[in-house]
Image (cartoon, rainbow, N blue to C red):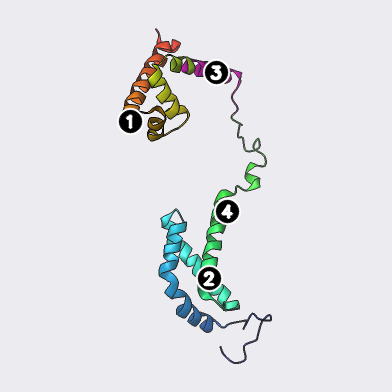
Amino acid sequence: MAEGCETGREGVGPAGMSAPEAMAWFLREVLPLEAILMQYLRHNWRDKSDIEDLLHDVYVRVYEAALKQIPEKTKPFVFTTARNLLISRVRSQQIVPIEAVADLDALGMAIDTPGPDRNLIARDELRRLSDAIDRLPPHCRDVVIMRRIQDLSRGEIAARLGLTEGTVSVYLTEGMYALADLLHSADPRSKP
């Protein structure tokens, strides 16, 4: 470091780095980390089109910090800065400003709660679906319930029922077609 630099807090090292000193440190210590930093950002950020911007933001934060104080260990500092930036981005994307939802009526937004008529229609449709499922052949009914209601995979269904996955697929297809036929034929709206 240049002579005459002030020392900062105890144990912290020199403070108030000049721009040329900070730039020299940045070029010597930070830029060689670019390849693994890019890999880290790609691995930890979904939107790949943001990677270059994230890299730039990390560099800006690291350089600005170096103007105040050069970190003792560069690599951990750079990756901590990158991690903190990613956390900040995630938080900013998930937070809805309170002003945006403070007065929904003033914004003219209606709350979408179903009225009694919609509840009645939904209950009737659910009853019709339940009746149609009960009318399916037992092997199709079991497979349809396990796949569409319990959300089990074909492999899990096959293991539970002692069938092959191919047989499960056939039963599921047959069951869904039969269910569609039962619902369509039982639909009072479908009759003239």
Q: Label 1 sits on what residue type?
A: Thr
Residue where numbered disc 2 is placed: 76
The Cα–Cα distance between marks 4 and 1, rounded to whole angstroms, is 46 Å
Query: Where residue 169 sits: x, y (%)?
Result: 33, 28
Q: Is residue 154 above or below residue 62?
A: above
Q: Nearer the viewer, residue 162 or 149?
A: 162
Q: CA distance from mark 2 to mark 3?
A: 58 Å
Q: Name the residue rendered at 37%, 28% in the picture.
A: 162
Tell me the quarter of the picture where residue 104 sits: top right
| Amino acid beneath label 3 | Arg
Q: Residues within 10 Å of mark 1 (few under 14, many from 20)?
A: some
Q: What's the amino acid at mark 4? A: Arg
Q: Is residue 31 left or right of residue 117?
A: left
Residue 66 in the image: state x and y as whole percent: 56, 76
Residue 184 rendering spot, x and y as whole percentages:
39, 15
Q: Is 124 one of the magenta-colored residues?
A: yes
The quarter of the image holding the N terminus is bottom right
Tell me where the magenta segment starts and ends, as one range: 113-129
Assess whether mark 1 and mark 3 are in contact (beta carbons under 8 angstroms): no
Residue linked to disc 1: 164
Q: Nearer the viewer, mark 2 or mark 1?
A: 1
Residue occupied by mark 3: 123
Q: Quadrant of residue 11?
A: bottom right
The crowding category of the residue bearing disc 3, from other C-alpha atoms within 10 Å (few below 14, some 14 to 19, many at least 20), is: few
Query: Helix, strand, or loop for circle 2?
Result: helix
Residue 16 within the magenta-colored segment of the rendering: no
